[in-house]
Amino acid sequence: MGDYVRQLPGSSAGLARRPGATQRFHLDVPLLGLLLALTLFGLVVLYSASGQDMGAVIRQGRFFLVGFAVMITAAQISLQRFQRWGPWFYLGGVALLVAVDIAGVGAKGAQRWLSIGGFRFQPSEIMKLTVPMTVAWYLADRTLPPRFKYIVACLGIIAIPAALILIQPDLGTALLIAASGLFVVFMAGIGWGYIFGAVLLAVASAWPVWMYGLKEYQQQRILTLLNPESDKLGAGWNIIQSKTAIGSGGWEGKGWLKGTQSQLDFLPESHTDFIIAVLAEEWGLRGVIILMGLYLLILLRGFWIGIHAQSSYGRLMAGSLTLTFFVYIFVNMGMVAGLLPVVGVPLPLVSAGGTSVVTLMAGFGLLMAVSTEPRRVVH
Amino acid sequence: MPQHIALKDPNREARIFSARTVTAILIVMGLLGLILARYHTLQITEYETYRTQSERNRVQLQPLPPKRGLIYDRNGILLADNRPSHLLSIVVERVPDLEQTLAELQQLVPISESDLEAFYKKKNQRRPYEAVPLRFRLTEGERAVLAVNRHRLPGVTVEAQLLRHYPHGELFSHAIGYVGRINERETFELDASDYRGTFHIGKVGVEKYYEDILHGDVGYQNVETNAHGRVLRVLERFDPKPGADLVLHLDIELQRVAFEALGEQRGAVVAMDPATGGVLALVSTPGYDSNLFVNGISSADYSALRDSPDVPLFNRAVQGQYPPGSTIKPMLAMAGLESGLVTPEYTVADPGWYSLPGDSRRYRDWILKIRGTGHAPRVDLEMAIAESCDVYFYDLARRMTIDGMYEYLHPFGLGERSGIDTTNERRGVLPSTRWKRDAMNQPWYPGETISAGIGQGYMLATPVQLAVATTALATHGTHYSPRLVQAINGEAVSAPQLPPVPGSEAHWQAVQAAMREVVHGRRGSARKIAKGIQYEMAGKTGTAQVIGIAQGEIYREEEVAERHRNHGLFIAFAPLENPTIAVAVIVENGGGSSAAYPIARQVIDAWLLDEENPAVAADVAGPVEAN
């Protein structure tokens, strides 16, 4: 297997060999292995986090099966086809977002879901893939690094869906989607001058907006978001409980199924957004390092695929999808540990829930399509 | 596009991408390291702290709701207090089978559908081990039944809490409003932590306007509980900050007199202190028992209130917009004097009707149907006000034009919210050519100016607006935005002053003298209330038409259905020298001002002739006792 891995980037040595099953199905074996390990680990943690509910584990397992099926299917599609289809999916997604803003079903006061024939889904989920796909499609055939007017066009492509999601209102998802698109621009080599300029502009405009654009209660909400522990009875309660869960885990952890914070219901959202606190409580810092190690390997593999991709489109997609995956990890682990504001971001491939699994796996399928691109060219 | 392909340099792009990837990897590693360092701090450095905290995981944070501020009248009589009441609540975590427990509880005490609905809603928002209220205001008997069955109902608790109570019920319903259970929309808008443990919120009136001040700040305590949830000891406690007490300008006696004087009639009375803008009485009838709303009004009670043709939930004093009728005349007279269009000596010929030059339509004076002629061959300003001559004001209005009237009447506060410290105030209408263009997209017709001259047509005012305008007449132009609240927690609140109404002393005195004649004059339109009066009162009657009367048709009151009868209005202030009270009264479908002025007399009597003062009381009784 080790030999095989080294031959993946379309080297002539690899081509000389008889194509194996993984090659025929365009699978990237190291990535597949890492994902399988991560999802299995996730199911073990979920069993404990859900209060030893086998039903929840089976349900999540089914999501994973669907996810892997989606990934393998996506891997069979040629990159050119992704490149051609991306913008159309993007347009469709934007249309659905408009529909959701007009006729969506509210959940906890926000309109995110669209119900068609009894089947409910979040159109914003589609955008997580199609925004980077569309930006990459737009930039792939142009000279890189992109010139100013192309950057402006990319910002337009990103801003439309982000604004539509923002008014649902779903600030977290809007920021993530904007980030996934901006990563493409970053990977395309946008000048550092633009990057620092944008950062300076954002910092400089924050003050007047804060002083004159926001009412006092809005300022209060933002302050609570930034410092949830100031609100001991509200948002702060979750963070105090999750920090207690993490901290009391120590190095060794309290043992699987033995976390008091999680098993006695003190930890909110223990099987969804806050699942990392269950892992940290029961498996200790050791468990956190194992999980982070798995994530890091997946990220490195993603970057590696990008560097060895043959087309601009492939490179841009691999780079941005990997960075987006990282942002999920960073935001979730940071918010549960009280380092970042609490926004509803699940821990990728570990938190219970189906939609994010399917989206993430579709992204990994695309990554595999990039990774197996060179062989396709020769066939 | 082809030119881009020509410029593309694949090798350079691959190099750029590789450099960016290296940067990205460095950033990713750095940030993951930061996260790992954070987990390291929590799990290794601060391990002991969190371990102890998790050991004590039966420690609960309990909210301590603040005591709602009390509301007093100016004499220190309680108008809204808090009374202990018992509520039944459930700690869901300690109940083995919630459905079964609820079913058992329903056997013991009555629990309504809306109680259950509110319970389930609240249950989904609670934190672990937080008690969820199920039934409020348990009776003594219900508490006894629950106490007996307590042992077989784990997780069910009966707690005492303070509940709003309005000792005077309907008397103050429109003056202070009420609190009610927090509804779903309010939950969304409220500061969730500040209202933890609070189940009620001001819904309307003073209770809503001063919600922030009345509510106070939530406190909390950390308590250690045993496995059964019993509190063993309080670990730390942050006391709630009680809401501020409000002292109102309202006088309960005055309020009662006004309320009883209106009796079964629909109407409103607003009495103000001209010197401060304080509202001494604010009554709208019919009212309702504010206590009904405190714990969720039953749907039968609510639909009875909502569907009543008398609209008891409607606060006529601030929401009711009525044509001011002839009560506008003193203000208009002031406008005429100030603009120089009339002088106190100026007279108008009064045949009992008026018509515009070159127009055959006759605008009738009200006296025409009674006497068949005008008030006098020539009418001056004093007579025009004292006898409420329409022709004089038809003529003045025509010469002044509608925009001239707007300019002079607007400073009195007409067509503008007075800014009174209560909810749902309406702004009325002070018409102008611009207003009509904006509101109806139509030009102004000269005939409409004529009806505006007697406060009819488009002109609308609320009783509070009329009271404010009356204070301006009483003080020679100095008036305030009305205030119900006099002091918050003992600290005086002063009413904001409105831009003064400009006017010369001589003109104010001329108008006041004419208003005095309304009451004290031999032919004054409110002379009936001058009988036995012990002070000098200035007033102005008004009658507002509810339905239009066609040209040539004579209006006969008895033939018109009750709901189509005219509204009766009266504004007044007293004593004439140095006034201490200004009153506006409206009686819906009262027929005419005679329904309104006796009420004003009673209210002012009650204010000026304090019966607790024996000297004055003896004076009142004087002629009868005659000793």
Image (tube, rainbow, N blue to C red):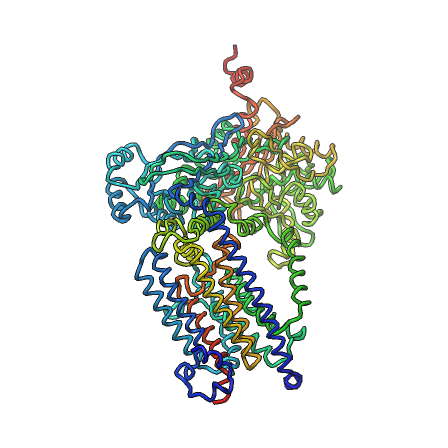
Nearer-the-camera pick, B299 or B92: B92
Residue at the (64%, 82%) spot, across then down: B9
Where residue B96 appears, x then y in whole percent? 27, 47
Residue at the (49%, 42%) spot, across then down: B194
Where residue A113 appears, x then y in whole percent? 44, 65
* Whether residue B595 is visible: no
Q: Is residue B357 left or right of residue B254?
A: right
Nearer-the-camera pick, B556 or A374: A374
What is the residue that sits farthest to the top in this orientation? B627
Nearer-the-camera pick, B2 or B134: B2
A68 over B534 or under it: above or below: below
* Whether residue A182 is visible: yes
Residue B474: image quadrant is top right
A328 over B618 or under it: above or below: below
Q: Is residue B627 left or right of residue A144?
A: left
A131 over B517 or under it: above or below: below
B113 over B612 or under it: above or below: below
Where residue B503 appears, x then y in whole percent? 73, 37
Residue at the (39%, 54%) spot, across then down: A282
Where residue B435 appears, x then y in whole percent? 64, 53
